[in-house]
């Protein structure tokens, strides 16, 4: 059964602690994490270690707090943003979740398709990726990947849970294998001390990409609402995604540096696992692992995109939206072919996503835990409408203070990230956006009062 935006009662929740850890570990050990680590290798292994062991765990604490909201109320991501945005305002969050998540499969599918071109080369002698005439094999690989993951996402969350377990096993084997091959060829001290003559981007640039990458897991409440306990929803999600993303970023960095030591050439466009596997000669099994693991990651993201549309439409029939998502992602997966390079598409996408979710999650956490002190009732989150289409929720249709603060934070991020880059390379664009969103919201609430506070407090 798919619940859409309906509240999930505790006796219907089926994700234990291990299920949640494996779900998010399986999502974290994705090809995008590998690419990010490979790109960040330009700054050296010390930066990648600091990011994986320190920055990432700290960065994901607010995200885990959002997961708690979904667990507490059995609410989807869209429903969990109602206090911060208002009932009608949260529908726009549904559109944002949809747009933010529907782009991820285009990144991962492109990487899986590269692996499939090598499989096709072995089976049919078609040109492998990077060879003359390899465009059509790449298109065929995109089609195969997109069709398979579209079918699985239509089955729903039950199939996704078991697929994640399989993906975790496969990617564990691949990550250990790749690391072993590199370390057999090169001493780790040489890898750890390796630096390129000049890095293309500053550490602040990668921190901004990381916020877009990590806070872009907008489907967090769509899965935490299935958790049986608060520890499963929060600690399980936080632990799984940190272990998965952090480890695979290290694997990606080690692999890319190994390739540079082998060939003497650093090309960020070859930072993906498929290109690394080809350069290191890991063989056909490794390419197939990348393919199946990519499908497993994409279906969780596509499911979240479908739930975003369900939340925007407030429908009681989520299945038809999952069908729509399955078809749309088939088209979206060809977007990287429009850009001059895959890395430029990757950076462009993370910049857009970061601008949306950085102020959004800042607002949601601040509003729920600080301003409202977690005093939100289920009946206000899941309230219906009157004959005129007005909400019956005490939280109201719109939280104007929340929207003004979020738009201010979004504007700061985009201005710094795209306009005043010389400032962003020092301060990042993310941290000023978080600060502006938080300060603006607290000031507005101090002046206008907590939206719907009186009715919420009376019911509490």
Image (tube, rainbow, N blue to C red):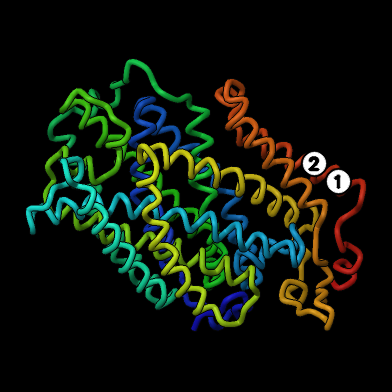
Residue drawn at point x = 67 percent, y = 37 percent? 433
Q: How many dots with numbers?
A: 2
Q: Where does the C terminus fall, quadrant-wise?
A: bottom right
In contact (CB < 8 Å): disc 2 and disc 1:
yes
Quadrant of the rendered image containing residue 289: bottom left
Question: Is residue 383 among what the camera can see?
Answer: yes
Q: Is residue 174 visible?
A: no
Q: Return the x and y of residue 22 as percentages of the image width and height.
A: 39, 62
Residue depicted at x 28% and y 30%: 267
Q: Is residue 210 above or below residue 460?
A: above
The image shows residue 7, relative to residue 286, as above or below, that is: below
- Give residue 454's mark: none
Residue 27: image location, x then y, percent: 40, 57
Q: Secondary structure at mark 2?
A: helix
Question: Which residue shows up at 80% across the image and 77% down it?
Answer: 389
Residue at left 42%, top 69%? 326
- Spatial CA span between label 2 and label 1: 6 Å
Q: Are there few (<14), some (14-19), or many (20+) residues within 10 Å of tag 1?
A: some
Q: Is residue 123 left or right of residue 5?
A: left
Please give left or right for residue 444 compared with residue 366 in the image: right
Q: Secondary structure at mark 1?
A: helix
Residue 317 place in picture, x, y as percent: 56, 82
Q: Residue furthest top?
A: 197
Crowdedness of circle 2 by 10 Å Cα count: few (<14), some, many (20+)?
some
Above or below, 4 relative to 245: below
Mark on residue 440? 2
- What residue would you read off at disc 1? 444
Left or right: 261 in relation to 227: left
């Amino acid at each position: 059964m798919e619940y859409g935006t309906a509240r999930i009662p505790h006796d219907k929740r089926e994700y234990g602690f291990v299920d949640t850890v494996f779900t998010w570990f399986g999502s974290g050990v994705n090809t995008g994490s590998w690419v990010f680590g490979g790109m960040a290798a330009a700054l050296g292994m010390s930066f990648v270690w600091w990011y994986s062991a320190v920055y990432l765990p700290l960065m994901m604490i607010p995200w885990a707090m959002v997961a708690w909201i979904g667990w507490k109320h059995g609410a989807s991501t869209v429903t969990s943003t109602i206090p911060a945005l208002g009932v009608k305002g949260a529908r726009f969050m549904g559109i944002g979740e949809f747009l933010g998540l529907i782009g991820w499969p285009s990144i991962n599918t492109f990487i899986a398709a590269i692996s499939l071109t090598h499989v096709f080369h072995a089976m049919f002698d078609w040109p492998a990726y990077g060879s003359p005439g390899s465009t059509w094999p790449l298109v065929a690989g995109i089609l195969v990947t997109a069709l398979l993951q579209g079918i699985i996402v239509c089955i729903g969350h039950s199939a996704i849970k078991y697929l994640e377990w399989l993906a975790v096993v496969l990617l564990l084997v691949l990550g250990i294998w790749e690391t072993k091959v590199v370390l057999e060829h090169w001493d780790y001290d040489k890898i750890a001390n390796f630096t390129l003559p000049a890095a293309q981007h500053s550490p602040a640039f990668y921190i901004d990409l990381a916020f877009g990458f990590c806070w872009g897991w907008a489907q967090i409440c769509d899965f935490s609402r299935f958790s049986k306990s608060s520890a499963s929803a929060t600690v399980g999600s936080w632990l799984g995604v940190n272990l998965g993303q952090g480890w695979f970023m290290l694997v990606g960095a080690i692999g890319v540096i190994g390739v540079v030591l082998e060939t003497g050439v650093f090309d960020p466009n070859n930072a993906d696992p498929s290109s690394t596997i080809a350069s290191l000669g890991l063989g056909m099994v490794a390419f197939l692992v990348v393919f199946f693991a990519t499908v497993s990651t994409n279906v969780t993201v596509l499911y979240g995109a479908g739930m975003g549309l369900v939340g925007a439409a407030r429908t009681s029939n989520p299945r038809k939206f999952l069908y729509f998502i399955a078809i749309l992602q088939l088209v979206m997966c060809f977007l990287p072919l429009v850009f001059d390079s895959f890395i430029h598409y990757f950076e462009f996408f993370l910049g857009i996503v970061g601008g949306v979710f950085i102020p959004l999650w800042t607002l949601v956490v601040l509003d729920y835990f600080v301003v409202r002190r977690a005093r939100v009732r289920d009946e206000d989150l899941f309230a219906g409408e009157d004959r005129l289409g007005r909400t019956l929720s005490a939280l109201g249709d719109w939280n104007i203070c929340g929207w003004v603060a979020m738009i201010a934070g979004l504007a700061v991020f985009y201005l710094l990230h795209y306009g005043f880059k010389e400032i962003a390379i020092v301060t990042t664009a993310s941290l000023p956006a978080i600060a502006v969103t938080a300060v603006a919201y607290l000031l507005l609430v101090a002046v206008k009062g907590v939206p719907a506070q009186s009715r919420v407090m009376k019911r509490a």
